[in-house]
Image (tube, rainbow, N blue to C red):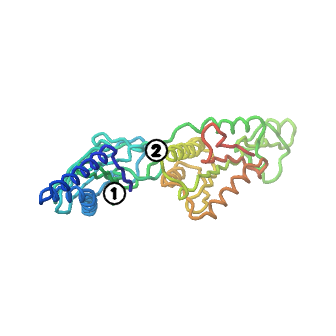
Amino acid sequence: MSIRLSKKGCAAYIIALISAVVFASFYGGLLPFLLLYAVLLLIPVSIIYIVLNYRFLSVYQELDSHRIVKGESHDFTVSLDNTGILPIHDMKMILHSDRCDFDAIRDKAKISLKAKQSVKLKAKAVCLYGGAYDVGLKSVGFSDPFGIIGIELNVPYTFRAVVAPKITEIAGTYMDIENLRNSIGMKSTVNNEEIPGNDMRLYVPGDPIRSINWKVSARLVKYVVRIPDRMDTRRITLILEPVNMSAVVQDTEFLRRRDYFLEFCVSAAWYFASRGLPVKIVYPSGKITEKQIDSHESFREFYNDVAGGMIYRSEDERDRMHRLAQERRQTGYGEETNVIICEDEWPGEDFCTVAG
């Protein structure tokens, strides 16, 4: 709730009040004092009228789907119902215009409702950021007839949309850095390629028959097998560390950062899934969760989970996630390459670290 006083309205009210006092003092009688009492009671009566308007206002709003994709157009409907016997005059509608675009409803547009009247407004809405947040009508504004005071009150019913980020190539540069490291010698010490390479050794019982190099074996009169090369791609683990949503205000700056963070995380996972490369992802979904992405199906599960928002169920989980991210930043952790993506940092400030 917020209350605003108009300087011009207050000045006009003070002048009217002084005039009413002077008029009643000099002339007396019924009419001067009626005017004086009317001026004196104007503000408290207006406040009571506003409270009653808000008390009997019913608001219902929705998108055509709870789960949508950033940038897509969806049908938005808001229903305003005045259930009281007093009319509502020039009520201001304040929208979440910082996160959604509406084609047929203007932010701060005014609407009047007669007693027992219902109005339904429809528009096309486009959500601008990925994540989970309230959309549509944010609050309603009321004012007295002379514009002295203005009161904004949150609507009694809000609509929370789950907006999936777009799948883009914004993480490709960082993932290419990982490929560059692998190509200059960072090979796995435990995983081999499925296709045999050029190195050879003598046949050992148990080796697959298809690995025998028959030409070399015929020349040496000994069975010789080709040895698979070590894999260029080591095991990859993505560590996703978002901020704790319960500790921040979902203003435009936060939504913009969360949108970029989600889009980057999804794009990083898609980078590997689209190439058929397995990747393990560690992220908070209430508790710290590990998910193996090795197919389009597993990526879709991760994508839907992330769209609902990465949250911590407690501060302990937040601290555990932070310690894990700091630990994996150290080079030489096991036989895997860790990519730590931290929402606390802004793009261009090393918010993504490749270690291993």
Depth check: 105 or 324 in front? 105
263, above or below 83, in the image: above
In which image quadrant can residue 124 be found? top left
344, above or below 173, in the image: below
Q: Could you tell me the amino acid type at mark 2? A: Tyr
Say what secondary structure mark 1 lies in: loop
User: Seen in the image, is 285 located left or right of residue 197?
Assistant: left
- Residue under pointer 2: 129
- Residue under pointer 1: 155
Alpha carbons under labels 2 and 1: distance apart: 22 Å
**Earlier along the polypeptide chain: callout 2 or callout 1?**
2
- Residue lying at 60% horizontally and 43% vertically, measured from the top left: 272
In which image quadrant can residue 97 be found? top left
**Which of the image's four quarters has the N terminus?**
bottom left
Q: Nearer the viewer, mark 2 or mark 1?
A: 1
Residue 59 image offset from top left, x and y in percent: 28, 57
- Residue lying at 34% horizontally and 56% vertically, measured from the top left: 153
User: Seen in the image, is 30 located left or right of residue 349?
Assistant: left
Depth check: 104 or 34 in front? 34
Residue 31 image offset from top left, x and y in percent: 12, 57
